[in-house]
Image (spheres, rainbow, N blue to C red):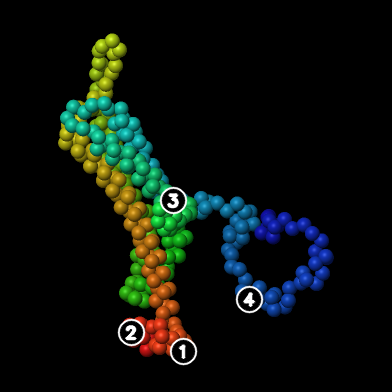
């Protein structure tokens, strides 16, 4: 069986190291009393190398969201071929289908991040030079654990909201499925509404015409918008919850430092640099 040490691919005559190869008794004692703690499976995986996140994590929203995505894409392909609507305009329907396709892509990227399948990256705006943070599994868990401890001290919070608030997009499978069912029914309706009319002349052509009623066009468009709103609302909530958590933790670090002052700092605060508010609080 492979070992972690073997992965170093060490090749040298250790005799040339002389006595420098030997650890001191204090170092050996420290290694024995404070060993790196790894389970057997962790040692084995580390020895084999090539740690891949998908060996450990999966995106639980893939199946239900792919079902929605597939049907939205088919509907979009059909709707884009319609040249004329007998009873109104399909412009809004077409535009919202395009928006939904984009949102599904964004949602799947987000859920892959927070489910541990992938890692998020900060985005730097070229215009403002501001860094925008996006959560992933490790970042959100770390922030959530810290926020739980903090809000427990400040507000008596004793539940998992400070952590799970970053992960709401992973808890809407039934809602996505319901939206997908609406889209599937609408897809059948749109497909059955189309007729092909031949246009005569020197160069005959054909035109795809839909006989959808105005009410049906409105209903189908509303279903598309609802699916988009569901995904975007949860994704943006998770992003904002994570960013709010980071802002709170940053403020905590600042306020915590303000409360930990020695005698020399107190002198500076009370006699030179402190505002009346700060002096009253520090004492």
Give the Cα distance between marks 2 and 3. 49 Å
The answer to whether mark 4 and mark 2 are in CB contact below 8 A is no
Give the Cα distance between marks 4 and 1. 38 Å
> Which residue in the protein does label 2 denote?
276
Specify the farthest residue to the front: 272
Q: Determine the image quadrant of residue 5.
A: bottom right
Q: Determine the image quadrant of residue 253.
A: bottom left
In the image, is residue 109 above or below residue 10? above
- Asked if one can make out residue 281 in the rendered structure from this viewpoint, the answer is no
Asked which secondary structure carries label 4, the reply is helix
- Foreground tag (3 vs 4): 3
- Foreground tag (4 vs 1): 1
> Which residue in the protein does label 4 denote?
33
In the image, is residue 262 above or below residue 66? below
> Which residue in the protein does label 1 denote?
263
> Which residue in the protein does label 3 denote?
112
- Foreground tag (1 vs 3): 1
């Amino acid at each position: 069986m492979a070992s972690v040490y073997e992965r170093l691919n060490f090749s040298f005559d250790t005799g040339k190291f002389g006595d420098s190869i030997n650890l001191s008794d204090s170092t050996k004692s420290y290694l024995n009393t404070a060993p790196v703690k790894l389970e057997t499976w962790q040692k084995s995986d580390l020895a084999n190398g090539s740690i891949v996140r998908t060996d450990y994590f999966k995106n639980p929203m893939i199946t239900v969201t792919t079902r929605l995505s597939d049907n939205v894409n088919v509907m979009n392909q059909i709707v884009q071929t319609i040249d004329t609507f007998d009873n109104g305009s399909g412009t809004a329907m077409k535009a919202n289908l395009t928006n939904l396709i984009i949102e599904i892509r964004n949602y799947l990227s987000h859920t892959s991040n927070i489910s541990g399948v992938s890692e998020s990256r900060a985005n730097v705006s070229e215009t403002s030079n501001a860094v925008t943070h996006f959560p992933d599994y490790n970042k959100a868990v770390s922030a959530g654990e810290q926020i739980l401890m903090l809000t427990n001290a400040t507000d008596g919070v004793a539940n998992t909201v400070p952590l799970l608030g970053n992960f709401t997009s992973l808890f809407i499978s039934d809602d996505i499925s319901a939206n997908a069912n609406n889209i599937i029914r609408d897809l059948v309706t749109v497909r059955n509404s189309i007729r092909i009319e031949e246009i005569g002349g020197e160069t005959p052509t054909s035109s795809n015409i839909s006989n959808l009623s105005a009410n049906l066009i409105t209903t189908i468009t509303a279903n598309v918008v609802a699916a988009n709103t569901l995904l975007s609302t949860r994704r943006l909530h998770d992003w904002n919850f994570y960013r709010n958590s980071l802002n709170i933790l940053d403020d905590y670090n600042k306020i915590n430092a303000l409360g930990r002052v020695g005698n020399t700092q107190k002198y500076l605060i009370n006699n030179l640099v402190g505002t009346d508010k700060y002096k009253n609080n520090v004492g």
